[in-house]
C-alpha cells in the first residue's frame, strides 16, 4: 500500500501520470484498474492494492533516470542525445505495396513484426489499435497472426496504457511490443529489475512520438463539422489514404469527416496531453527499433510513405538485414544529422522545450 499511496499522492494527484499501465499490471489481482479521465487514462487503486517497489522505480510520471538506464541497458551513454543510441540508421519503406499503404508511413514496423512472428522469434505482438466495437476508444491488443498485425498498422494519437497488457501475457511465451517513449523506458526498468512478465517482451518497437491528444479532440472536430454529440462514431482512422494521410471519421448517421494531417495538427495546442509536454524523449530511445515519418522534400515529393528507421540493438539490425536480403524492406543507409534534420522542430520541442516546461512546473 505504501507504493500505491505514493503513486496516488505524488504522481496521479499531481497531474504527472502518463497512463503507462505498469502499476496496474503488477498490482495484486483485482486491486487496480485503468480508468478514463478527461485527459487520458490513469490508474485507480483499491485500499488493499499492493505494489512492488520496482513499480515506483519504473514510473515514468515520477521520472526515469535516463543516464542510469542508458548505462544499465546499453552499457554507455549515447553519443548523440537528440536521437539516442544508434546501431544502424536507414530511410525507406516496406517493399510490399499493401503493407506500405496500410502503415502510417512506410509500413516498416508492420513488416518487421510479421517477420518476427513468421520466423518464430515471438508468439504474439502487443499492439495499439482503435477499438472495433467502440471506435472512439483505443486499446492494446495481442496480435497472433499476420492479418491481425496488419489490422493494427494505423497510427493512434490518443493515450493507451500499453504496459497493462503485461498481466495478460501467457507464461513461457515470447512477445514483441510497440509502445511510446515513456512506456519503453518504464518497460526497460522493469526488465532490468527482474520482472518476469516484462522479460517476456523480447523486442520493443515504437514510433517517434512528439504529441498525443486527449480524446476530447475528436468530438471537438466533429462539432466544428456540425456533427451532433449523440451521433456515434462507427469508424476512425488517423492516417487513412495515401501518405501522409488524413483523419477519417465515419458516423452512424452516415456523415464522413476528413481532415488532412497538416490540418488536424491544429488540434494539438488545445488538446495536447500533459505527458507530451513533460516527456523529453522524442525518438523512443529505449526501443530495439524506432520508426518515424521521413519528413524531407525529397521523400514528400515522391509520396507513398517513407520512414526513418533506427535500430538500437545488434539483434534488431540482424532482423532488418534479413528483411532486406529477402527484399521485404527497401532501405538505404542514413546518417544521424540527416535523420535529425527531418525532425528538428520536434526534437527541439521535446529536448529543450520539455526541459524548460518541467523547470517551470517545478
Image (cartoon, helix red, strand yellow):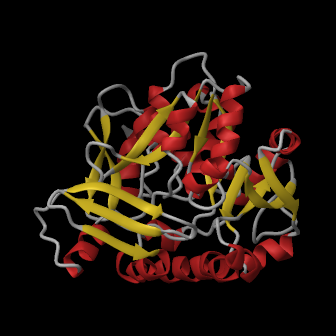
Residue at image position (31%, 52%) is 137
| In this picture, residue 188 sits left or right of residue 339 | left
Q: Nearer the viewer, residue 354 or 306?
A: 306
Identify whether 291 is placed above or below 302: above
Q: Nearer the viewer, residue 327 or 338?
A: 327
| In this picture, residue 327 sits left or right of residue 184 | right
Residue at image position (77%, 60%) is 92
Q: Position of residue 153 (x, y in %)?
A: 53, 49
Residue at image position (75%, 72%) is 82
User: Quadrant where the N terminus lies?
Assistant: top left
Q: Position of residue 291 (x, y in %)?
A: 68, 58
Q: Is residue 79 visible?
A: yes
Residue at image position (54%, 42%) is 150
Residue 125, quarter of picture:
top right
Q: Nearer the viewer, residue 233 or 24?
A: 233
Q: How many marks?
A: 0
Q: Residue most toward the front?
A: 97
Q: Nearer the viewer, residue 134 or 303?
A: 303
Q: Is residue 86 visible?
A: no
Q: Position of residue 264 (x, y in %)?
A: 41, 77
Identify whether 30 is placed above or below 39: above
Q: Position of residue 145 (x, y in %)?
A: 55, 28
Amino acid at each position: 500500500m505504501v507504493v500505491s499511496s505514493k503513486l496516488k499522492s505524488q504522481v496521479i494527484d499531481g497531474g504527472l501520470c502518463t497512463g503507462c499501465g505498469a502499476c496496474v499490471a503488477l498490482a495484486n489481482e483485482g486491486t487496480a484498474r485503468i480508468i478514463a479521465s478527461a485527459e487520458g487514462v490513469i490508474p485507480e487503486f483499491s485500499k488493499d492494492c499492493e505494489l512492488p517497489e520496482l513499480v515506483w522505480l519504473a514510473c515514468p510520471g515520477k521520472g526515469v533516470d535516463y543516464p542510469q538506464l542508458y548505462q544499465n541497458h546499453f552499457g554507455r551513454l549515447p553519443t548523440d542525445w537528440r536521437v539516442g543510441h544508434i546501431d544502424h540508421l536507414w530511410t525507406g519503406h516496406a517493399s510490399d505495396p499493401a503493407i506500405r499503404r496500410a502503415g502510417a508511413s512506410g509500413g516498416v514496423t508492420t513488416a518487421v513484426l510479421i517477420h518476427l512472428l513468421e520466423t518464430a522469434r515471438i508468439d504474439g505482438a502487443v499492439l495499439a489499435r482503435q477499438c472495433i466495437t467502440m471506435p472512439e476508444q483505443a486499446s492494446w491488443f495481442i496480435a497472433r497472426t499476420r492479418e491481425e498485425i496488419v489490422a493494427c498498422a494505423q497510427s493512434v494519437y490518443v493515450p493507451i496504457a500499453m504496459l497493462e497488457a503485461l498481466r495478460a501475457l501467457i507464461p513461457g511465451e515470447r512477445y514483441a511490443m510497440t509502445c511510446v517513449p515513456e512506456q519503453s523506458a518504464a518497460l526497460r526498468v522493469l526488465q532490468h529489475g527482474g520482472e518476469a512478465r516484462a522479460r517476456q517482451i523480447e523486442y520493443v518497437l515504437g514510433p517517434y512520438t512528439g504529441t498525443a491528444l486527449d480524446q476530447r479532440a475528436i468530438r471537438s472536430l466533429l462539432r466544428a463539422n456540425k456533427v451532433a454529440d449523440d451521433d456515434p462514431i462507427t469508424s476512425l482512422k488517423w492516417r487513412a489514404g495515401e501518405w501522409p494521410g488524413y483523419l477519417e471519421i465515419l458516423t452512424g448517421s452516415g456523415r464522413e469527416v476528413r481532415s488532412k494531417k497538416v490540418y488536424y495538427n491544429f488540434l494539438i495546442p488545445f488538446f495536447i496531453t500533459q505527458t507530451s509536454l513533460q516527456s523529453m524523449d522524442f525518438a523512443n530511445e529505449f526501443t530495439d527499433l524506432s520508426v518515424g515519418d521521413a519528413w524531407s522534400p525529397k521523400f514528400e515529393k515522391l509520396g507513398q510513405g517513407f520512414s526513418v528507421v533506427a535500430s538500437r540493438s545488434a539483434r534488431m539490425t540482424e532482423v532488418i538485414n534479413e528483411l532486406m536480403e529477402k527484399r521485404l524492406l527497401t532501405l538505404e543507409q542514413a546518417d544521424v544529422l540527416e535523420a535529425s534534420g527531418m525532425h528538428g522542430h520536434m526534437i527541439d520541442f521535446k529536448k529543450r522545450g520539455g526541459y524548460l516546461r518541467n523547470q517551470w512546473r517545478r
